[in-house]
Image (cartoon, helix red, strand yellow):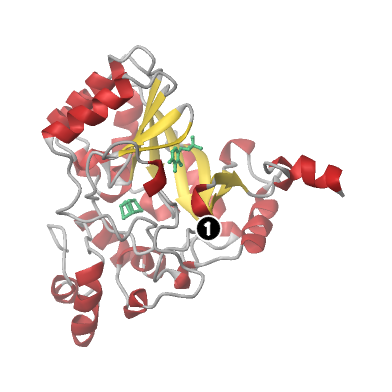
Amino acid sequence: MTSRTLRSAEELADAGLIAHDSVPALAEVARRYSIAVTPTVAALIAQHGAPMARQYIPTAEELITAPHELDDPTADAPFTPIKGVVHRYPDRALLKPLLACPVYCRFCFRREAVGPDGGLLSEAELEAALDWFARTPAVREVILTGGDPLMLSPRRLGYILERLAAIPHIETLRIHSRVPVADPSRLDGAMLAALTLERPLYLCVHANHAAEFTPEAARALHGLHGAGLVLLGQSVLLRGVNDSEGALEALFRAMLRNRVKPYYLHQLDPAPGTARFHVPVEEGLALLRGLRGRVTGLAWPTYVQEEPEGGGKFPLGMEGLRPGAGQARQAR
Ligand SMILES: *Cc1c(COP(=O)(O)O)cnc(C)c1O
Ligand code: SF4
Protein backbone atom coordinates (compact mmCIF):
# COMPACT_ATOMS: atom_id res chain seq x y z
CA MET A 1 0.00 0.00 0.00
CA THR A 2 1.00 3.57 -0.60
CA SER A 3 3.05 5.35 2.05
CA ARG A 4 2.36 8.96 1.03
CA THR A 5 -0.62 11.06 -0.02
CA LEU A 6 -1.67 10.60 -3.67
CA ARG A 7 -2.31 13.94 -5.34
CA SER A 8 -2.95 13.35 -9.06
CA ALA A 9 -4.86 11.09 -11.44
CA GLU A 10 -1.52 9.49 -12.46
CA GLU A 11 -0.70 8.65 -8.85
CA LEU A 12 -4.19 7.20 -8.29
CA ALA A 13 -3.72 5.01 -11.40
CA ASP A 14 -0.25 3.89 -10.31
CA ALA A 15 -1.71 2.88 -6.94
CA GLY A 16 -4.41 0.85 -8.73
CA LEU A 17 -7.27 3.07 -7.51
CA ILE A 18 -8.41 4.11 -11.02
CA ALA A 19 -7.90 2.61 -14.49
CA HIS A 20 -4.93 3.97 -16.46
CA ASP A 21 -7.16 4.83 -19.43
CA SER A 22 -9.26 7.20 -17.27
CA VAL A 23 -6.20 9.33 -16.38
CA PRO A 24 -6.63 12.02 -19.11
CA ALA A 25 -10.30 12.67 -18.20
CA LEU A 26 -9.62 12.72 -14.45
CA ALA A 27 -6.52 14.88 -14.83
CA GLU A 28 -8.91 17.42 -16.36
CA VAL A 29 -11.18 17.16 -13.28
CA ALA A 30 -8.10 17.61 -11.07
CA ARG A 31 -7.30 20.92 -12.78
CA ARG A 32 -10.52 22.26 -11.29
CA TYR A 33 -10.90 20.24 -8.05
CA SER A 34 -7.93 19.08 -5.98
CA ILE A 35 -7.19 15.43 -5.26
CA ALA A 36 -5.68 14.00 -2.07
CA VAL A 37 -5.86 10.41 -0.86
CA THR A 38 -3.89 9.72 2.32
CA PRO A 39 -2.40 6.27 3.01
CA THR A 40 -5.13 5.78 5.64
CA VAL A 41 -7.84 6.49 3.07
CA ALA A 42 -6.15 4.40 0.34
CA ALA A 43 -6.19 1.43 2.76
CA LEU A 44 -9.89 2.08 3.53
CA ILE A 45 -10.71 2.13 -0.18
CA ALA A 46 -8.82 -1.13 -0.73
CA GLN A 47 -10.66 -2.79 2.14
CA HIS A 48 -14.19 -1.35 1.84
CA GLY A 49 -14.59 -0.37 -1.82
CA ALA A 50 -17.40 1.86 -3.02
CA PRO A 51 -18.51 3.69 0.17
CA MET A 52 -14.91 4.88 0.61
CA ALA A 53 -13.93 5.31 -3.04
CA ARG A 54 -16.99 7.45 -3.83
CA GLN A 55 -16.00 9.99 -1.19
CA TYR A 56 -12.48 10.62 -2.51
CA ILE A 57 -11.89 9.29 -6.04
CA PRO A 58 -12.77 11.85 -8.76
CA THR A 59 -15.11 11.02 -11.63
CA ALA A 60 -15.68 12.75 -14.98
CA GLU A 61 -19.24 13.69 -13.88
CA GLU A 62 -17.76 16.37 -11.61
CA LEU A 63 -17.41 18.72 -14.56
CA ILE A 64 -21.17 18.55 -15.24
CA THR A 65 -23.24 21.13 -13.36
CA ALA A 66 -26.86 20.08 -12.80
CA PRO A 67 -29.51 22.83 -13.21
CA HIS A 68 -30.21 23.09 -9.45
CA GLU A 69 -26.54 23.39 -8.45
CA LEU A 70 -25.18 26.73 -7.21
CA ASP A 71 -21.70 28.23 -7.40
CA ASP A 72 -21.67 29.41 -3.80
CA PRO A 73 -24.27 27.16 -2.13
CA THR A 74 -23.66 28.60 1.33
CA ALA A 75 -23.46 32.24 0.16
CA ASP A 76 -20.55 33.03 2.51
CA ALA A 77 -19.45 36.10 0.58
CA PRO A 78 -21.97 38.64 1.97
CA PHE A 79 -21.11 37.58 5.53
CA THR A 80 -17.35 38.15 5.35
CA PRO A 81 -16.47 41.24 7.43
CA ILE A 82 -12.73 40.63 6.96
CA LYS A 83 -10.66 38.08 5.05
CA GLY A 84 -10.83 34.61 6.66
CA VAL A 85 -13.92 35.35 8.82
CA VAL A 86 -17.58 34.44 8.15
CA HIS A 87 -20.08 36.04 10.54
CA ARG A 88 -23.61 34.94 9.76
CA TYR A 89 -25.06 34.23 13.21
CA PRO A 90 -24.86 36.81 16.00
CA ASP A 91 -23.06 34.77 18.68
CA ARG A 92 -20.53 32.79 16.61
CA ALA A 93 -18.27 33.22 13.61
CA LEU A 94 -16.03 31.09 11.44
CA LEU A 95 -12.29 31.62 11.18
CA LYS A 96 -10.73 30.01 8.10
CA PRO A 97 -6.94 30.14 8.62
CA LEU A 98 -6.21 27.99 5.53
CA LEU A 99 -8.01 26.15 2.75
CA ALA A 100 -5.92 22.96 2.63
CA CYS A 101 -7.43 19.62 3.74
CA PRO A 102 -5.98 16.16 4.43
CA VAL A 103 -8.23 14.75 1.67
CA TYR A 104 -10.46 16.43 -0.93
CA CYS A 105 -14.00 15.09 -0.66
CA ARG A 106 -15.75 14.89 -4.00
CA PHE A 107 -19.05 16.17 -2.53
CA CYS A 108 -17.54 19.14 -0.67
CA PHE A 109 -19.62 22.34 -0.72
CA ARG A 110 -16.41 24.41 -0.62
CA ARG A 111 -14.82 22.42 -3.44
CA GLU A 112 -14.30 25.51 -5.59
CA ALA A 113 -12.26 27.10 -2.80
CA VAL A 114 -10.31 24.32 -1.04
CA GLY A 115 -6.92 23.13 -2.28
CA PRO A 116 -3.35 22.61 -1.17
CA ASP A 117 -1.88 25.96 -2.27
CA GLY A 118 -4.65 28.44 -1.58
CA GLY A 119 -6.02 30.35 1.30
CA LEU A 120 -3.33 30.36 3.98
CA LEU A 121 -3.86 33.68 5.75
CA SER A 122 -0.72 35.80 5.81
CA GLU A 123 0.62 36.96 9.19
CA ALA A 124 -0.99 40.37 8.66
CA GLU A 125 -4.33 38.88 7.57
CA LEU A 126 -4.38 36.53 10.56
CA GLU A 127 -3.62 39.40 12.97
CA ALA A 128 -6.39 41.46 11.38
CA ALA A 129 -8.85 38.55 11.75
CA LEU A 130 -7.84 38.00 15.40
CA ASP A 131 -8.29 41.71 15.99
CA TRP A 132 -11.80 41.54 14.48
CA PHE A 133 -12.73 38.87 17.06
CA ALA A 134 -11.22 40.96 19.88
CA ARG A 135 -13.40 43.95 18.95
CA THR A 136 -16.64 42.04 18.25
CA PRO A 137 -18.03 41.26 21.73
CA ALA A 138 -21.27 39.73 20.40
CA VAL A 139 -19.23 36.74 19.22
CA ARG A 140 -18.86 34.17 22.02
CA GLU A 141 -17.70 31.22 19.93
CA VAL A 142 -15.01 30.93 17.27
CA ILE A 143 -15.37 28.03 14.85
CA LEU A 144 -12.09 27.17 13.15
CA THR A 145 -12.73 25.63 9.77
CA GLY A 146 -11.38 26.04 6.27
CA GLY A 147 -10.05 23.85 4.76
CA ASP A 148 -9.01 21.88 7.79
CA PRO A 149 -7.42 23.70 10.77
CA LEU A 150 -5.59 20.53 11.88
CA MET A 151 -3.49 20.84 8.68
CA LEU A 152 -1.73 23.80 10.34
CA SER A 153 1.51 23.16 12.17
CA PRO A 154 0.97 22.62 15.91
CA ARG A 155 2.90 25.85 16.52
CA ARG A 156 0.69 28.02 14.34
CA LEU A 157 -2.56 26.38 15.47
CA GLY A 158 -1.48 26.65 19.12
CA TYR A 159 -0.73 30.34 18.62
CA ILE A 160 -4.17 31.01 17.09
CA LEU A 161 -6.00 29.10 19.82
CA GLU A 162 -4.08 30.90 22.57
CA ARG A 163 -4.78 34.31 21.06
CA LEU A 164 -8.50 33.52 20.76
CA ALA A 165 -8.70 32.03 24.25
CA ALA A 166 -7.20 35.26 25.65
CA ILE A 167 -10.19 37.29 24.40
CA PRO A 168 -12.52 37.68 27.41
CA HIS A 169 -15.83 37.42 25.50
CA ILE A 170 -14.83 34.23 23.61
CA GLU A 171 -16.39 31.55 25.80
CA THR A 172 -15.88 28.46 23.65
CA LEU A 173 -13.77 27.40 20.70
CA ARG A 174 -14.65 24.85 18.07
CA ILE A 175 -12.67 23.09 15.33
CA HIS A 176 -14.23 21.25 12.39
CA SER A 177 -11.87 18.58 11.02
CA ARG A 178 -11.55 15.44 8.96
CA VAL A 179 -7.98 14.78 10.19
CA PRO A 180 -8.89 12.32 13.01
CA VAL A 181 -10.28 9.85 10.47
CA ALA A 182 -8.42 10.82 7.26
CA ASP A 183 -4.89 11.36 8.60
CA PRO A 184 -4.80 10.44 12.30
CA SER A 185 -0.97 10.43 12.33
CA ARG A 186 -1.08 14.26 12.44
CA LEU A 187 -2.48 14.07 15.98
CA ASP A 188 0.88 13.50 17.64
CA GLY A 189 2.09 14.76 21.03
CA ALA A 190 2.88 18.25 19.70
CA MET A 191 -0.59 18.61 18.17
CA LEU A 192 -2.32 17.36 21.33
CA ALA A 193 -0.26 19.84 23.37
CA ALA A 194 -1.39 22.66 21.06
CA LEU A 195 -5.02 21.59 21.53
CA THR A 196 -4.83 21.46 25.33
CA LEU A 197 -6.55 24.63 26.54
CA GLU A 198 -8.30 25.92 29.60
CA ARG A 199 -11.13 27.25 27.43
CA PRO A 200 -13.64 24.58 26.36
CA LEU A 201 -12.60 23.29 22.94
CA TYR A 202 -15.15 21.34 20.91
CA LEU A 203 -13.88 19.22 18.04
CA CYS A 204 -16.42 18.33 15.39
CA VAL A 205 -15.15 15.28 13.48
CA HIS A 206 -16.39 14.87 9.91
CA ALA A 207 -16.98 11.15 9.14
CA ASN A 208 -19.54 9.51 6.87
CA HIS A 209 -19.04 5.77 7.29
CA ALA A 210 -18.42 3.45 10.24
CA ALA A 211 -15.31 2.01 8.57
CA GLU A 212 -13.60 5.40 8.89
CA PHE A 213 -13.20 4.68 12.62
CA THR A 214 -10.03 2.61 12.17
CA PRO A 215 -7.88 1.57 15.15
CA GLU A 216 -5.57 4.55 14.36
CA ALA A 217 -8.53 6.95 14.29
CA ALA A 218 -9.78 5.45 17.56
CA ARG A 219 -6.38 6.07 19.19
CA ALA A 220 -6.32 9.66 17.92
CA LEU A 221 -9.84 10.33 19.22
CA HIS A 222 -8.97 8.80 22.58
CA GLY A 223 -5.96 11.15 22.73
CA LEU A 224 -8.12 14.17 21.92
CA HIS A 225 -10.62 13.20 24.59
CA GLY A 226 -7.75 12.75 27.04
CA ALA A 227 -6.58 16.28 26.20
CA GLY A 228 -9.95 17.57 27.39
CA LEU A 229 -11.68 18.18 24.08
CA VAL A 230 -15.41 17.57 23.69
CA LEU A 231 -15.93 15.41 20.60
CA LEU A 232 -18.87 15.89 18.22
CA GLY A 233 -19.60 14.18 14.91
CA GLN A 234 -20.84 15.65 11.65
CA SER A 235 -21.76 13.66 8.57
CA VAL A 236 -23.21 14.32 5.14
CA LEU A 237 -26.00 12.08 3.87
CA LEU A 238 -24.50 10.64 0.67
CA ARG A 239 -25.89 8.33 -2.00
CA GLY A 240 -23.84 5.13 -2.15
CA VAL A 241 -21.97 5.91 1.08
CA ASN A 242 -24.41 5.99 3.98
CA ASP A 243 -27.91 6.11 2.43
CA SER A 244 -29.37 3.18 4.37
CA GLU A 245 -30.66 2.72 7.91
CA GLY A 246 -27.97 0.11 8.54
CA ALA A 247 -25.13 2.35 7.36
CA LEU A 248 -26.32 5.31 9.43
CA GLU A 249 -26.84 3.18 12.53
CA ALA A 250 -23.34 1.69 12.16
CA LEU A 251 -21.85 5.19 11.64
CA PHE A 252 -23.52 6.75 14.68
CA ARG A 253 -22.72 3.73 16.87
CA ALA A 254 -19.05 3.86 15.74
CA MET A 255 -19.01 7.53 16.77
CA LEU A 256 -20.46 6.79 20.21
CA ARG A 257 -17.94 3.98 20.83
CA ASN A 258 -15.25 6.60 20.19
CA ARG A 259 -16.76 9.20 22.56
CA VAL A 260 -18.05 11.23 19.60
CA LYS A 261 -21.61 12.57 19.97
CA PRO A 262 -23.38 12.75 16.57
CA TYR A 263 -24.20 16.44 16.16
CA TYR A 264 -25.29 17.16 12.59
CA LEU A 265 -26.32 15.03 9.64
CA HIS A 266 -26.11 17.44 6.68
CA GLN A 267 -28.32 17.36 3.67
CA LEU A 268 -25.92 17.63 0.70
CA ASP A 269 -25.36 21.21 -0.42
CA PRO A 270 -25.92 21.58 -4.17
CA ALA A 271 -22.31 22.37 -5.15
CA PRO A 272 -21.49 22.01 -8.87
CA GLY A 273 -20.83 18.45 -10.05
CA THR A 274 -22.10 16.63 -6.95
CA ALA A 275 -25.46 15.34 -8.23
CA ARG A 276 -24.43 11.67 -7.94
CA PHE A 277 -24.41 12.04 -4.14
CA HIS A 278 -27.89 13.56 -3.82
CA VAL A 279 -30.43 11.88 -1.52
CA PRO A 280 -33.88 13.55 -1.38
CA VAL A 281 -34.88 15.07 1.98
CA GLU A 282 -37.98 12.81 2.23
CA GLU A 283 -35.71 9.79 1.98
CA GLY A 284 -33.35 11.19 4.62
CA LEU A 285 -36.26 11.81 6.99
CA ALA A 286 -37.55 8.27 6.42
CA LEU A 287 -34.10 6.83 7.23
CA LEU A 288 -33.94 8.77 10.49
CA ARG A 289 -37.51 7.82 11.42
CA GLY A 290 -36.40 4.20 11.04
CA LEU A 291 -33.69 4.71 13.67
CA ARG A 292 -35.74 6.73 16.15
CA GLY A 293 -36.67 4.77 19.25
CA ARG A 294 -34.82 1.63 18.15
CA VAL A 295 -31.36 3.22 18.55
CA THR A 296 -30.16 5.11 21.65
CA GLY A 297 -31.07 8.79 21.65
CA LEU A 298 -27.36 9.60 22.05
CA ALA A 299 -26.90 8.45 18.45
CA TRP A 300 -29.47 10.97 17.17
CA PRO A 301 -28.01 13.89 15.16
CA THR A 302 -29.95 16.91 14.00
CA TYR A 303 -30.63 16.59 10.27
CA VAL A 304 -29.88 20.01 8.78
CA GLN A 305 -30.06 21.73 5.45
CA GLU A 306 -28.28 24.90 4.40
CA GLU A 307 -30.89 27.36 3.16
CA PRO A 308 -30.04 28.99 -0.18
CA GLU A 309 -29.08 32.71 -0.29
CA GLY A 310 -27.36 32.60 3.11
CA GLY A 311 -30.47 31.75 5.12
CA GLY A 312 -28.36 29.53 7.38
CA LYS A 313 -28.76 25.96 8.56
CA PHE A 314 -32.26 24.73 9.16
CA PRO A 315 -33.23 21.54 11.08
CA LEU A 316 -35.24 19.25 8.80
CA GLY A 317 -38.26 17.45 10.16
CA MET A 318 -38.97 20.42 12.45
CA GLU A 319 -40.90 22.45 9.91
CA GLY A 320 -43.03 24.00 12.67
CA LEU A 321 -39.89 25.77 13.95
CA ARG A 322 -39.08 27.33 10.60
CA PRO A 323 -38.84 31.11 10.97
CA GLY A 324 -42.16 32.56 9.88
CA ALA A 325 -44.01 29.23 10.15
CA GLY A 326 -46.24 30.60 12.95
CA GLN A 327 -47.18 33.73 11.01
CA ALA A 328 -47.92 31.68 7.90
CA ARG A 329 -50.37 29.55 9.87
CA GLN A 330 -52.03 32.62 11.44
CA ALA A 331 -52.41 34.25 8.06
CA ARG A 332 -54.33 31.29 6.71
C1 LIG B 1 -22.57 26.12 10.14
C2 LIG B 1 -22.13 27.45 10.46
C3 LIG B 1 -21.92 27.85 11.79
C4 LIG B 1 -22.13 26.91 12.95
O1 LIG B 1 -23.48 26.63 13.13
P1 LIG B 1 -23.96 25.73 14.35
O2 LIG B 1 -25.40 25.52 14.07
O3 LIG B 1 -23.68 26.51 15.60
O4 LIG B 1 -23.14 24.47 14.31
C5 LIG B 1 -21.52 29.14 12.03
N1 LIG B 1 -21.34 30.02 11.02
C6 LIG B 1 -21.54 29.67 9.75
C7 LIG B 1 -21.33 30.69 8.68
C8 LIG B 1 -21.94 28.38 9.42
O5 LIG B 1 -22.11 28.05 8.13
S1 SF4 C 1 -12.23 17.90 4.43
FE1 SF4 C 1 -14.06 19.19 4.59
S2 SF4 C 1 -13.50 21.15 3.60
FE2 SF4 C 1 -11.97 19.60 2.98
S3 SF4 C 1 -12.73 18.74 1.06
FE3 SF4 C 1 -13.53 17.40 2.68
S4 SF4 C 1 -15.57 18.27 3.18
FE4 SF4 C 1 -14.42 19.84 2.03
Task: Give the residue at mark 1.
Answer: 247
Answer with left or right where residue 27 lies relative to residue 49. Answer: left
Give residue 203's position: percent from left, percent from top: 37, 33
Q: Which of 178 and 148 is in front in this view?
A: 148
Q: Nearer the viewer, residue 138 or 206?
A: 138
Q: Is residue 160 above or below residue 292?
A: above
Answer with left or right where residue 235 lies relative to residue 196. Answer: right
Q: What's the amino acid at mark 1?
A: Ala
Question: Which quadrant of the view contains residue 81?
Answer: top left
Question: Is residue 8 something that shows in the picture?
Answer: yes
Give residue 64's position: percent from left, percent from top: 38, 78
Q: In this view, does 27 lie above or below 33?
A: below
- Which quadrant: the N terminus? bottom left
The single residue placed furthest to the bottom in the displayed view is 21
Question: Which quadrant of the view contains residue 14?
Answer: bottom left
Give residue 316's position: percent from left, percent from top: 64, 49
Answer with left or right where residue 10 lies relative to residue 61. Answer: left
Q: Which of 71 and 298 is in front in this view?
A: 71
Answer with left or right where residue 91 lies relative to residue 94. Answer: right
Q: In this view, does 166 lie above or below 295?
A: above
Question: Which quadrant of the view contains residue 243?
Answer: bottom right
Mark 1 closeness class: few <14, some 14–19, many ≥20 residues within 10 Å: some
The single residue placed furthest to the top in the displayed view is 168
Q: Residue drawn 18% across and 83% down?
A: 24
Give residue 103's position: percent from left, percent from top: 26, 55
Q: In this view, does 171 lie above or below 270?
A: above
Q: How many marks?
A: 1
Q: What element carries label 1?
A: helix
Question: Is residue 191 something that shows in the picture?
Answer: no
Ligand 2 within 8 Å, label 1 CB: no
